[in-house]
DNA sequence: TTGCCATACCTCGCCTCGCGAGGTATTATG
DNA sequence: CATAATACCTCGCGAGGCGAGGTATGGCAA
């Protein structure tokens, strides 16, 4: 997995996941790596700063919770603003991937 | 067009174009911007360093030519190594776009 | 009890690279 | 003669992935 490709889609990926249901950081790492069949391999040094960035932008919102195990976790939910951004970025992604597919089709 | 998305696909795009036929830099800028229906808006400050990078990597090869107009241009062709890289990156792109589409589908 | 692994959070610094801005020179147009 | 288009180039800023490192807790096995 190339870092540039990851960088390009990390925001909508995370927004999309926490739009389904609240997730905490460690869970997101596992979730993404599992559900992408190994295409993505998120690192924690990537995810946590990214979560903070998205929260600072007002696209997600975190709250601390104590699990049954007694461990504290920070769960993130998408905001109204975040949903708007997700839709925009998803649309952008569609336009881009269409354009790229057209250009690369003969080589795939 | 977001810069991260561009960064992610600029290499295979250029390789793909010069794999079709030799092109010079200024021509590539126009070609990409036209053929992508405005999705891409390459800047020269982006392209020329990129061409140098790809040539340094041995993926493309440039040669100076004098046009009928008398203007000198540097035409780039893809190398054997470049074709290999293009195929790899095109495959990577396919795997990634499939994964992303699956994750974002409900939002597109 | 003592390790050790998994969970769960975090930061720091390196490195890469798009691109805005700026530069040079030539040819075509009006 | 001035302006636009062609055609090449560089510099410096800023953003962000990630390798590496750190802290703390829970659970399990020896």
Image (cartoon, coloured by chain):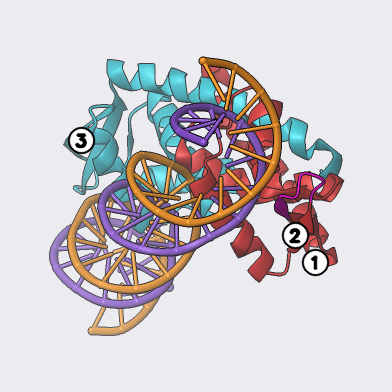
Chain colours: A red, B cyan, C purple, D orange
In the rendered image, residue A43, in percent from the top left (x then y), is placed at 52, 41
> Could you give the CA–CA distance between mark 2 and mark 3, rounded to whole angstroms?
38 Å
Query: Is A36 positioned to the left or the right of B102 in the image?
Result: left
Region rendered in magenta:
A67-73
- From the image, state whether disc 3 or disc 1 is nearer to you: 1
- Check disc 2 and report the residue beneath it: A85
Do the residues marked 2 and 3 share a common chain?
no
- Check disc 1 and report the residue beneath it: A81
Chain of the residue under label 2: A
Count neighbours of disc 1 (C-alpha within 10 A) and say few if under 14, some if 14 to 19, many if 20 or more. few
Instruction: Judge whether residue A69 is colored magenta.
Output: yes
Query: Is A60 positioned to the left or the right of C12 in the image?
Result: right
User: In percent of the image, x 72 and y 41: which residue is there?
Assistant: A94
Q: State the SS at label 3.
A: helix
Q: Nearer the viewer, residue A86 or D30?
A: D30
Q: Nearer the viewer, residue B59 or B107?
A: B107
User: In percent of the image, x 71 and y 28: which residue is there?
Assistant: A35
Which label is found at residue A38?
A: none
Query: Is A33 positioned to the left or the right of B50 in the image?
Result: right
Residue B51 found in image quarter: top left
Q: Are marks 2 and 3 in contact (CB under 8 Å)?
A: no
Residue B33 seen from this side: no
């Amino acid at each position: 997995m190339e870092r540039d490709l990851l960088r390009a889609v990390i925001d909508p990926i995370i927004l999309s996941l926490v739009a389904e249901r609240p997730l905490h950081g460690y869970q997101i790492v596992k979730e993404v790596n599992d559900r992408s069949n190994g295409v993505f391999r998120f690192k924690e040094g990537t995810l946590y700063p990214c979560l903070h960035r998205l929260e600072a932008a007002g696209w997600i919102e975190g709250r601390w919770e104590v699990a049954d195990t007694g461990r504290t976790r920070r769960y993130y939910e998408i905001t109204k603003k975040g949903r708007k951004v997700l839709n925009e970025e998803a649309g952008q992604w569609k336009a881009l991937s269409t354009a790229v597919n057209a250009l690369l089709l003969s080589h795939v």
